[in-house]
Amino acid sequence: MSDKRVAIITGATGGIGLEVAKRLGKDGYTVILNGISHDTGEKVTAELVAAGMDAHYAGFDVTDEAAVTENIVKIGEKYGKIDTLVNNAGGLGGRSRFEEMTTEFYRNVMALNLDSVFFASRAAIPFLKKGEHPSIINYTSNAAWNAGGPGAGIYGTSKAGVHAITRALAKDLAEYKIRVNAVSPGTIDTPFHKQIKSTKPEVFASWANNIMLGRLGQPEDVAGVVSFLASKDAAFITAETIQIGGGQALGI
């Protein structure tokens, strides 16, 4: 069994996920970065290794049940445990009004944001039971409460599911002392907003006006909270969702 704590971060080849992997790597974890862009995954992992971190890349699609199970079991068996699972992978998946929404679109968004959490968590549980103050950290969104913006109704629905499954997992795993929490990032300056940032920069910049702290979030803002939730400092926190939005959820 590995002496170091082991963390798996899904969707970790860029944006918030990569920043979380860097932070946990600096915290002394063995970090397993998951992604589907293998060239990018190998490149960023090599950068973390060059910076002195114990980092490895695991390429698999989080919506593929068999691939998720196979890879997480392989990781768990290699290290003898998993200490932290960060279900970071997710996304808007596009926009569609319900009247025109195809079943394929619906299923794809639900698979990316909710199925992925179920598949990865289920596979990791036997190894989390062997971990050191083990925990699962999921990602929900303001959209889980306000049902999302125009055309993002299924995204909001999927994230509401993540909010519920976080609490359900926390109940289910409490007897094993496995904590389950979620973070709810507000508007974070990442490639997630690439399209509007490039086509309507004035609109993107104006979003800061709706945030109490007067700025957009940075990936580091999320990574710091994930680091805390994974640590023994959060040993008595479970079934919680932490808003990381500079007060955005309250509106101003």
Image: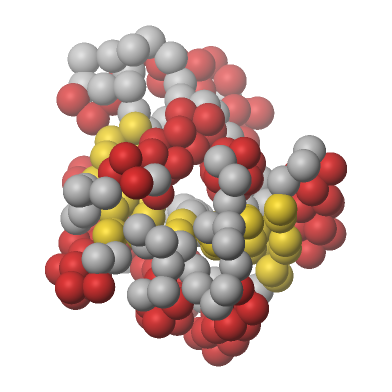
Residue at the spot 65% in from the left edge and 28% down from the top edge: 198
Query: In this view of the protein, which residue sits in the foreground, 161 or 134?
Result: 134
Residue 174 x, y percent position in the rendering: 19, 68
Query: In this view of the protein, which residue sits in the foreground, 215 or 8?
Result: 8
Residue 80 x, y percent position in the rendering: 55, 77
Query: In this view of the protein, which residue sits in the foreground, 47 or 63?
Result: 47
Q: Quadrant of the C terminus?
A: top left
On screen, residue 228 above or below 63: above
Q: Which quadrant would residue 36 be assigned to in this image?
A: bottom right
For residue 90, side relative to residue 195 (left or right): left
Q: Which quadrant would residue 37 be assigned to in this image?
A: bottom right
Q: Which quadrant would residue 98 be assigned to in this image?
A: bottom left
Residue at the spot 69% in from the left edge and 69% down from the top edge: 58
Residue at the spot 21% in from the left edge and 48% down from the top edge: 237
Residue 176 x, y percent position in the rendering: 25, 73
Residue 91 x, y percent position in the rendering: 49, 54
Q: Quadrant of the N terminus?
A: bottom right
Q: What is the total number of numbered labels drawn onto the structure image?
A: 0
On screen, residue 28 above or below 215: below
Query: In this view of the protein, which residue sits in the foreground, 79 or 248?
Result: 79
